[in-house]
Image (cartoon, helix red, strand yellow):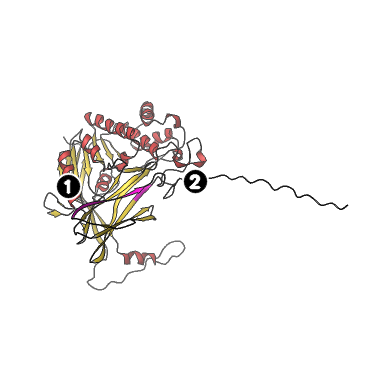
């Protein structure tokens, strides 16, 4: 008997045109609300909104005790699938049938109140999953020990770093004895030692019957602990099966820029963002060792690698990326000098983001490759990469938990948090002026 069955799942969104959004912005305000004026349309003219299928015809089955890894590029529909299974989002078509308690780790800090202590948040989170107070109190010591927050148990969570947030969230989730655990890229947050503990605990619980759906860009972790891999491409299933086989196919497709999806959907191209000169094959977040990671520790250097497939010899290529966070444009970085391709093939453009620059928040990256061969042109890939930056120290960039007034809440520390040089300069008080006396 299967613990999870997805049948012909589909999720459709309607994307409004720029004209529609501009018209909404011009709606007159009446103080207490907005007045929507009717829009005149010519006879026979349809809506300007276009449909976007985040998922389409997705079907799979998961047996109890299976760890299913889900891979795919940004925008492939991975997070949408988990949100449907977690009942956060309703599907447009199809259905999901699951058996047992479902616990999800979809977003850092979700289900926690930063003004409450860790103890209170554990009780509150357990109640949200239908677990009695007596039951969670019996597991309290195990939860605290695994999360390694004994010293800060009664501190409000606003004093926690994002790494501590993760440890507590994962410990609560895994100790609630779920039947199905949904884990997004959030498991990529935290130090290496804790990541290994998480993966080992997931594998241990899987052997006891826990079903896990694990979304990550860390292909080595997926290959190591997963029993099966589901590969999503532009909302459809491009492959499913043995981890080594599917991951190899996924990597090959990302490298060459195209692949064929299985089923009746026919040929589907991956990452075909290019022109006659060059093509963006993939965009990845790397650590200093050159390994692909899903999240960026703020205390370490990280790299964004833009893999470009050159199609012309003696062409000029110049990379540029725009970083966005919280709806704001953070900064733009451009390659100082263009490179000249000596042959057709793959070229990697690497840009380093220094330590102590990023804040505890989620970033998205738009990538542009400027090309020149006879004439100037460019290749643009919007939302090429999304990643979470997290702090590993106990109190974030502003101090330890013992200094509550100085520590920002996770997710509220702005769009950058650079470590700047501060100096203290003392000024000697002016001496009293001598009064002149008359003889």
Q: Is residue 133 above or below residue 61?
A: above
In the image, 141 versus 190, the foreground residue is 190
Where residue 252 is drawn, which disc sits there?
1
Q: Nearer the viewer, mark 2 or mark 1?
A: 2
Q: Is residue 37 visible?
A: yes
Q: Is residue 49 above or below residue 407?
A: below
Relative image position of residue 69 (x, y in whole percent): 22, 40
Q: Residues within 10 Å of mark 2 (few under 14, many from 20)?
A: few
Where residue 229 is drawn, which disc sits there?
none
Q: Is residue 356 above or below residue 100?
A: below
For the point 28% across and 71% down, which residue is it?
Answer: 41
Q: Is residue 266 above or below residue 208?
A: below
In the image, 182 versus 314, the foreground residue is 314
Bounds of the magenta span?
Answer: 341-363
Queried whether the magenta region covers residue 256, the answer comes back as no
The residue identified by callout 2 is 421
Callout 1 secondary element: helix
126 horizontally vs 342: left or right = right
Callout 2 secondary element: loop
């Amino acid at each position: 008997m299967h613990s999870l069955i997805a049948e012909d799942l589909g999720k459709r969104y309607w994307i409004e045109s720029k004209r529609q959004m501009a018209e909404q912005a011009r709606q007159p305000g009446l103080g207490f609300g907005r007045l929507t004026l009717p829009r005149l349309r010519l006879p026979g003219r349809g809506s300007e909104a276009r449909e976007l299928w985040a998922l389409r015809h997705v079907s799979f089955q998961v047996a109890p005790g299976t760890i299913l890894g889900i891979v795919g590029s940004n925008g492939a529909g991975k997070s949408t699938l988990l949100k449907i299974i977690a009942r956060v989002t309703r599907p447009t078509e199809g259905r999901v049938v699951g058996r047992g308690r479902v616990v999800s780790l979809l977003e850092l800090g979700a289900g926690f109140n930063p003004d409450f202590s860790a103890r209170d948040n554990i009780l509150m989170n357990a109640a949200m999953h239908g677990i009695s107070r007596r039951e969670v109190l019996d597991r309290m010591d195990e939860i605290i020990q695994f999360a390694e927050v004994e010293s800060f148990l009664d501190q409000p969570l606003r004093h926690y770093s994002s790494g501590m947030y993760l440890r507590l969230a994962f410990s609560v989730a895994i100790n609630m004895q779920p039947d199905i655990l949904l884990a997004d890229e959030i498991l990529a947050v935290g130090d290496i030692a804790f990541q290994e503990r998480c993966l080992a605990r997931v594998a241990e619980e899987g052997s006891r019957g826990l079903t896990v759906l694990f979304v990550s860009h860390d292909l080595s972790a997926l290959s190591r602990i997963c029993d099966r891999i589901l590969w999503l491409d532009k909302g459809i299933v491009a492959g499913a099966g043995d981890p080594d086989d599917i991951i190899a196919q996924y990597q090959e497709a990302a490298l060459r820029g195209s692949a064929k999806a299985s089923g009746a959907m026919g040929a589907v191209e991956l990452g075909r963002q290019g022109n006659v000169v060059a093509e963006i094959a993939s965009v990845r977040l790397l650590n200093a060792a050159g390994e692909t990671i899903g999240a960026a520790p703020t205390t370490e250097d990280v790299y964004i690698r833009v893999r470009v497939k050159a199609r012309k010899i003696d062409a000029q290529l110049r990379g540029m990326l725009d970083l966005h966070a919280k709806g704001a444009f953070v900064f733009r970085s451009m390659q100082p000098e263009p490179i000249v391709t000596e042959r057709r093939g793959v070229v990697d453009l690497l840009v380093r983001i220094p330590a102590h620059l990023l804040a505890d928040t989620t970033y998205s990256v738009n990538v542009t490759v400027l090309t020149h061969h006879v004439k100037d042109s460019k290749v643009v890939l919007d939302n090429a990469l999304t990643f979470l930056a997290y702090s590993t120290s106990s109190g974030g960039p502003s101090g330890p938990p013992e200094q509550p007034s100085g520590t920002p809440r996770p997710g509220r520390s702005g769009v950058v948090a650079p470590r700047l040089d501060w100096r203290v300069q003392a000024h000697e008080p002016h001496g009293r002026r001598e009064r002149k006396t008359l003889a």
